[in-house]
Image (tube, rainbow, N blue to C red):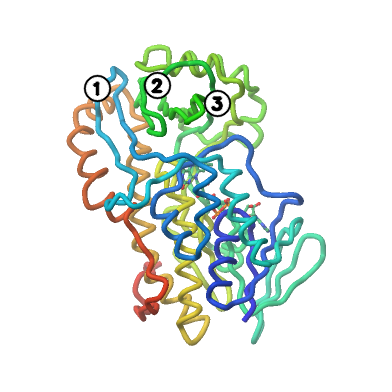
Amino acid sequence: MKALIIGGGIAGPAAAIALHEAGIDSVVHEAHAASADDVGVFLTLGSNGIDALRTIGADAPAVAAGFPTPAIDMVSTTGKALGRVRTSRPDGDITSRTLKRADLYRAIRDEALRRGIRIEPGKRLVGAQDTEGAVRAVFADGSEECGDLLIGCDGLHSTVRGLIDPTAPAPAYSGLIGLGGYTSGVPVDARTGSYRMVFGKRAFFGYVPAPDGEVWWFANVPRSAEPARGELERIDSEQWRRRLIELFADDIGPAVDLIRASREITPAGPMHAMATLPVWHRGRMIVIGDAAHAPSPTSGQGASLSIEDAVELAKALRDRPTIESAFTAYEALRRPRVERIVKQAARINNNKAAGPTGRILRDLLMPLILPRLANGEQSRRTYGHHIDWDAPTATIEGAGRPRR
Ligand SMILES: Cc1cc2nc3c(=O)[nH]c(=O)nc-3n(C[C@H](O)[C@H](O)[C@H](O)COP(=O)(O)OP(=O)(O)OC[C@H]3O[C@@H](n4cnc5c(N)ncnc54)[C@H](O)[C@@H]3O)c2cc1C
């Protein structure tokens, strides 16, 4: 069997490694010429994402590229403690890690290359035909490649999603603009590796001290209307710096100092999420990762879920007798989990963009709600998730797909 993987971000190379472990050949086609590395942005790889990489023997490079992040402390605009999210696996065996997104891309891609997997840069998929017995992928440079199945790992603005279902919904704008930066020489009141996040008066701010003394920070700025294409690109880094200093002027914490001293501000981008995609697969084509179910960055789970997807799909293809039955079993397994996490992140997003009355309610209710959300059963299910590579994929066919 040969799989055509579209997208060389996180899900794509992870799927190629997992398929390789399952004895299935694949080739990864990535639209960007050199690499898909995104400069500047950092993320948290959850203990569940690390565990999924460990399942396929690919966790070490990603773990080495980051630093441990055991907890996130949430505070209100006045500094009132709202709750602590523990981001480690409940048995303490694996701790989530913070790393630059480009480093995570590189770690997984290099591991795929080390195993002899072919990664083709400069191949932007523009079409695909699912004919009897094979699927043919067509690329913008006019080239084509045939395989037994096609896995769309092409991210939030997926092309494969539309090829599977032309009526598929587009990702929804979450009402927030995300940006961030890296600052040296500003002391902060947080433990190395752990985040402190402030539900500020006008915007949301998070920061984490790295082991080398640098502080990594991000801001989520509410903006009700989705910015027009090119609008954010016209605002330069210094304009953002001034705007952010104004936005955080009344809040507790080091936001203003960190922003003022930041050596750069990463380019701003609107934050999107893909909640419920009705159709994940058709014939020999399927979407996984952000292409199927992107949680907003608030969840801290997008990368981890993409890796879990890759491992579960490879397992289903290894265990089920046909591609169709593997896709169906995979969807039934994955849909309830990923949609729960996407919905949870959307609820937190609403609190980041709260108005004056919403803020009062949020600061009253969060200390009551957050401990249950963050450290109870929900958190255990999110961060403690484990995929048993040796157990055969169950046949729970038909379950999980929502009614249209
Ligand atoms: C600011 C920000 C902060 C985030 N923070 C976190 C966090 O803390 N924790 C976390 O887990 N997640 C976080 N995420 C989300 C995380 O980055 C994504 O969930 C993850 O990258 C999804 O992986 P993916 O492989 O599905 O998609 P991507 O990583 O987006 O990769 C898709 C790839 O497909 C390629 N591609 C697209 N179209 C085509 C085509 N037609 N043909 C060929 N190739 C194509 C793209 O170039 C890209 O390389 C954050 C995201 C952002 C933007």
Q: Are the residues tagged 3 and 1 within 8 Å (C-beta)?
A: no
Helix, strand or loop status at disc 1: loop
Q: Position of residue 17 (x, y in %)?
A: 57, 66
Q: Earlier in the sequence, mark 1 or mark 2?
A: 1
Element marked by disc 2: loop
Give the residue type that dot 2 points to. Arg
State the mark number for residue 80: 1
| 10 Å crowding of disc 2: few (<14), some (14-19), many (20+) | many
Q: Earlier in the sequence, mark 3 or mark 1?
A: 1
- Quadrant location of the N terminus in the rendered image: bottom right
Residue topped by disc 2:
202
In the depicted structure, whether residue 18 falls above or below residue 111 = below
In this rendering, the label closer to the viewer, 3 or 1: 3
In the image, residue 322 lies at what x, y percent? 51, 85
Asked whether 59 or 322 is in front, the reply is: 59
Nearest the viewer among 163 and 220 is 220
In the displayed structure, would residue 383 be above or below residue 187? below
Q: Position of residue 184 (x, y in %)?
A: 54, 20
**Residue at image coords 42%, 26%:** 205
Q: Nearer the viewer, residue 326 or 39?
A: 39
* In-image side of 70 versus 324 (left or right): left
For disc 3, the marked residue is: 182
* Residue at image location 49% in from the left, 51% down from the top: 303
| Callout 3: SS | strand
| In-image side of 371 versus 34 (left or right) | left
268 displayed left or right of 198: right
Q: Quadrant of residue 143?
A: bottom right
Disc 1 residue type (three-letter): Lys
Position of residue 356 relative to residue 6, above or below, is above
